[in-house]
Structure formats: structure tokens, C-alpha cells
């Protein structure tokens, strides 16, 4: 078990390094000059070249990347070109908003998916099952930003109960500000979870041990919740881990839709400003989050499924 854990951690480290290398390379090769954006279009070429030298952008790309990796290993993510602040401090300031969004959105999507998948599997072939399956198809087809805009138009603006943007100052304002973004993120994530969990629940209900329990007079609700659901949970957990990348992509879209000052909106701003240290720092954090989801998924699956734990 220890060897397997070490192998997984080594693979995770290699994946993070690879993600950093790709982000670093693509950022440097993208059109546009950070020095030109900082100095303005009226600046002379000599001034732009001097700024590039000051930022270290005139050196070979491989040299820049090795220096960046060395600095990251020493806890230094660099300084933002646009604000001159430490990237680490900027990420720390903005990570709270993203953490609120990811936690609330993922938690709500899991509650929604378990509830609807259980209803659909328990009433397979009825109008309830058909309605839930149609809901998943429609939700997959709807763009995330459009769902957010519709929630603003249909709930926030007519009622005034919830803000249309921003994050507020107090805890109550944080909760109010995150409700609509979390619902939007849940609508984005839940359809795949519902379909996978429903399919596995239907298969579990048709298995021999469930039919044997039914023959002994066990109520259908208990069969569904106590027997079928635990066995169907492992594949659903795997799907949640696979969705980690989609979760972060959804966070980027939703933070910009609702003007939340989180890592997603900061990433879009950094791309527009060619702020390479900020882009690389946020990408590093996102890669670590995705890989952490995968590792936690493996651990939870092993905890739930004895067959995985034995292997």
C-alpha cells in the first residue's frame, strides 16, 4: 500500500510539472507583449526592450522555465506584472471566493444528483424518470453563462433578494452572493452525475443480492437507499473526480458572469494583460486541485468498495 501511495504521489508531481510547463510555454508563445501593454502603445521599441530585459523575458524560454520551477520549489511564485504584488498573496486573497463557489456548487450538485438519480431509478419508466432524464439533457445543452444570466433575470432582478454580482463584505453577504453562482455551477455539473448514478442504481437494483432481499420482503425504499445506493456510489465518485477540470472551467465562467473576485476572473484578467506569473500561478493551483480530487476519489472509492481496497 505504501509503494502504491508513493507511486500515485510521484505521478501527481509529474502531472503538476507537466501542466506548469504547458501553461508556461503557451503563455510565452501567445501573441502580445506584456511590456507593450504595461508601457502603452506610444512607448518606443527601446523602452519595450528595456522592460522585457527587466522582466527577464529576453532570455531563452527554457532558461526562464527552469528558473521559474526553481523559484516555485522555494515557495516563490513570482510577482504580478500588472500590480507588482506577490502572486502568492494575490492567489491567497482571491482563493476564498473560489473556495466558497467550488464547495457550495459541488455540494449542491451532489445533493441534487443523488436526489434526482434515486427518484429516477426508483420510478424507472414513469413520467418522473422521463422528466429527470429530459432535465439532464437540457442542462447539458445549456451554456453555463446563459444559466447564470437567466437566474439573474428570473430571480435576482425581480425579487431583489440576492445580489446580481460581487461577493459582499460580511458572512451573510457572502452567503447571499454565492447562492446563484452555486446553483449555476450545480446545474453545470449535476446532469452527468445524475445519468451515471441512475444507470448504476438501475443495475444494482437488478442484481441478485437485491432481488434476494426483495424476496424476503425488504421495502423498496430500503432496497434503494441501503443496498443499491452504496454499491452505485463508487462509479459516481469517479465521475466527480473526472469532473474536477470541468468544475474549475465552470468556476472561471461563473465568476466572470457574476463578477466574483476569485481565481477564475483573475485568470481571465491575467490572460488579457499577458501577466505570465499570475497565469502560471493560478494554473499551478488549478492543476493541484484537479489532481487532489483524483487522489481523494481513489481514497473514497477504496473506502466504499472492498474490492478496490483489496486490489
Image: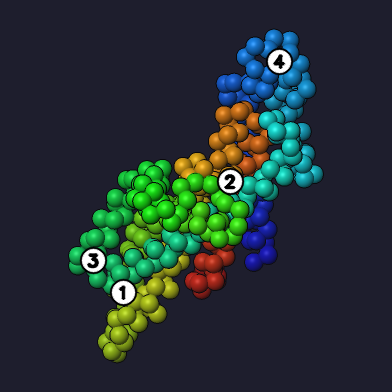
Instruction: Identify residue for label 2.
Output: 262
Circles 1 and 3, Cβ within 8 Å, touching? The answer is no
Circles 3 and 2, Cβ within 8 Å, touching? The answer is no
Q: Nearer the viewer, mark 2 or mark 4?
A: 2
Upstream in sequence: badge 4 or badge 3 = 4
Upstream in sequence: badge 3 or badge 2 = 3
Upstream in sequence: badge 1 or badge 3 = 3
Tell me if mark 3 has few (under 14), some (14-19) or many (20+) residues whose alpha carbon lies within 10 angstroms of its own: some
Instruction: Identify residue for label 1.
Output: 205
Callout 1 secondary element: helix
Q: Which of marks 3 and 2 is in front?
A: 2
Residue at x 55% of width, y 60% of height: 172
Residue at x 43% of width, y 60% of height: 109
Q: Is residue 281 above or below residue 110?
A: above
Instruction: Identify residue for label 3.
Output: 128
Tell me if mark 2 has few (under 14), some (14-19) or many (20+) residues whose alpha carbon lies within 10 angstroms of its own: many
Amino acid at each position: 500500500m505504501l509503494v502504491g501511495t508513493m507511486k500515485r504521489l510521484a505521478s501527481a508531481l509529474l502531472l503538476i510539472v507537466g501542466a506548469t510547463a504547458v501553461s508556461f510555454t503557451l503563455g510565452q508563445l501567445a501573441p502580445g507583449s506584456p511590456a507593450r501593454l504595461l508601457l502603452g502603445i506610444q512607448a518606443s521599441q527601446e523602452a519595450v526592450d528595456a522592460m522585457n530585459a527587466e522582466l527577464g523575458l529576453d532570455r531563452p524560454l527554457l532558461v526562464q522555465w527552469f528558473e521559474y520551477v526553481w523559484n516555485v520549489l522555494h515557495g516563490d511564485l513570482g510577482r504580478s506584472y500588472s500590480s507588482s504584488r506577490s502572486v502568492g498573496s494575490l492567489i491567497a486573497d482571491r482563493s476564498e471566493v473560489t473556495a466558497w463557489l467550488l464547495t457550495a456548487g459541488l455540494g449542491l450538485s451532489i445533493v441534487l444528483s443523488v436526489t434526482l438519480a434515486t427518484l429516477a431509478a426508483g420510478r424507472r419508466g414513469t413520467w418522473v424518470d422521463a422528466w429527470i432524464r429530459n432535465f439532464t439533457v437540457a442542462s447539458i445543452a445549456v451554456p453555463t453563462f446563459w444559466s447564470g444570466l437567466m437566474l439573474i433575470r428570473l430571480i435576482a432582478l425581480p425579487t431583489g433578494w440576492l445580489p446580481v454580482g460581487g461577493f459582499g463584505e460580511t458572512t451573510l453577504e457572502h452567503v447571499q452572493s454565492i447562492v446563484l453562482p452555486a446553483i449555476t455551477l450545480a446545474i453545470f455539473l449535476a446532469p452527468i452525475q445524475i445519468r451515471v448514478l441512475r444507470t448504476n442504481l438501475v443495475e444494482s437494483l437488478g442484481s441478485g443480492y437485491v432481488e434476494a432481499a426483495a424476496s424476503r420482503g425488504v421495502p423498496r425504499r430500503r432496497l434503494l437507499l441501503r443496498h443499491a445506493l452504496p454499491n452505485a456510489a463508487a462509479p459516481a465518485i469517479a465521475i466527480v473526480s473526472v469532473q474536477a477540470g470541468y468544475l474549475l472551467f465552470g468556476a472561471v465562467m461563473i465568476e466572470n458572469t457574476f463578477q466574483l473576485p476569485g481565481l477564475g476572473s483573475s485568470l481571465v484578467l491575467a490572460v488579457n494583460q499577458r501577466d505570465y506569473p499570475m497565469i502560471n500561478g493560478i494554473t499551478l493551483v488549478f492543476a493541484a486541485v484537479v489532481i487532489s480530487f483524483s487522489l481523494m476519489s481513489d481514497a473514497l472509492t477504496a473506502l466504499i468498495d472492498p474490492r478496490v481496497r483489496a486490489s
